[in-house]
Image: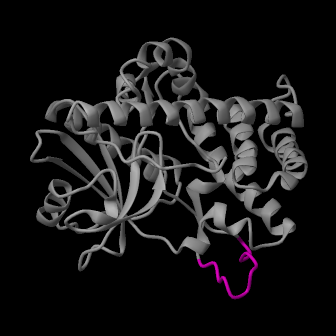
Amino acid sequence: MSSLQVDIDLLTQFENGLNERWPERSQIPATVLGYGEISTVLEIDAEGQREFAFKRMPMFNSNEEAEAYEALYKEYIEALQQSIGIQLLPEAIVRLQNNRGRFVAYIAQQKLPAEAIGHKLIHHVSRADIRRLVQAVLHESKKLFDFNAQHQGEIELGFDMQISNWAVVGFDPQRSELPDPIELVYFDTSAPLLRRNGHEQLNPELFLRSAPSFMRWIIRLLFLQDVLTRYYDFRKVAVDLIANFYKEQRPDLVPALVEVVNQFFANEVGQANDEPIGIKEVESYYREDKLIWQVYLTFRKIDRALHRMLRKNYPYILPEKIER
């Protein structure tokens, strides 16, 4: 597992002076590069750190929880790279306890050129190149799902293959076309879903920590099991891959990509018993997903306001709005 040299003392200083509401106003300023459901990606404005992207994960209740997460994360990374052969970014994981007693993990990765990341690329290259990009994503992802099929009941990995989780190596934005062949690197590793002997190893309660306490019971009841199983199903993550193009403001590509994915499954996967993916299925999936995350973000903001009223620290960094 390749790793980066991270200044742990500086990272601790950054965490202790972090302004979660306005990261750019922190003692050591930071820029938000992206938002996830359980993490926020930051660029820290400090000498020697600007070349890294830091995923901040503050949802641990104890050092033991954070330590277990770190061990699982490293196992997941090793399996992706060594057992499956998916190319990842150089990375490091750091655990620390901040001056408010909270246990936090940071995943540091080499920062990518923004124009090389999938959800940026699809606005600057041809439709033919986008088809090639999606085909390349499917071929890379198939390695993992083939591994799962071969090791079913022993060890299996969950995987989120949406377009924003990949970057194209060597992309030249001046040319506005993808290289041939397309070489991909994957970087969304912060949710290390891994089953051993059929049992999920990632603590499912970690997914709920960022949710308001008054919502956790319904999320646990209605959505958690789906989250924990969806990413082990190649067809379901393929639907998610296509639906993500609505979020990325390219709905015009959806019909062609449905065709690309169905052709790939017919020729490369051979799941004859599965129904071909339909445009209406993708639309329905996207509408439901959009509604869930809009409601979720709204209630998280209410929860943040309640924390402020009670003079409690709210440890998560929230977007003001997510374009979906």
Model colouring: one colour
Q: Which residues are magenta?
A: 170-181
x then y, percent, for residue 136: 71, 58
Q: Residue at x 79, y 63 (%)?
A: 130
Residue 157 in view (yes/no): no
Q: Residue at x 49, y 50 (%)?
A: 320
Residue 193, compared with residue 244, is above or below; it is above
Question: Quadrant location of residue 19?
Answer: bottom left
43 vs 165, nearest the viewer = 43
- As drawn, is 257 to the left or to the right of 87? right
| Secondary structure predominantly adopted by residues drawn in magenta | loop
Residue 126 in view (yes/no): yes
x then y, percent, for residue 223: 55, 20
166 vs 252, nearest the viewer = 252
Q: Check the picture and name the quadrant holding the N terminus.
A: bottom left
- As drawn, is 235 to the left or to the right of 45? right
x then y, percent, for residue 12: 14, 57
x then y, percent, for residue 116: 60, 72
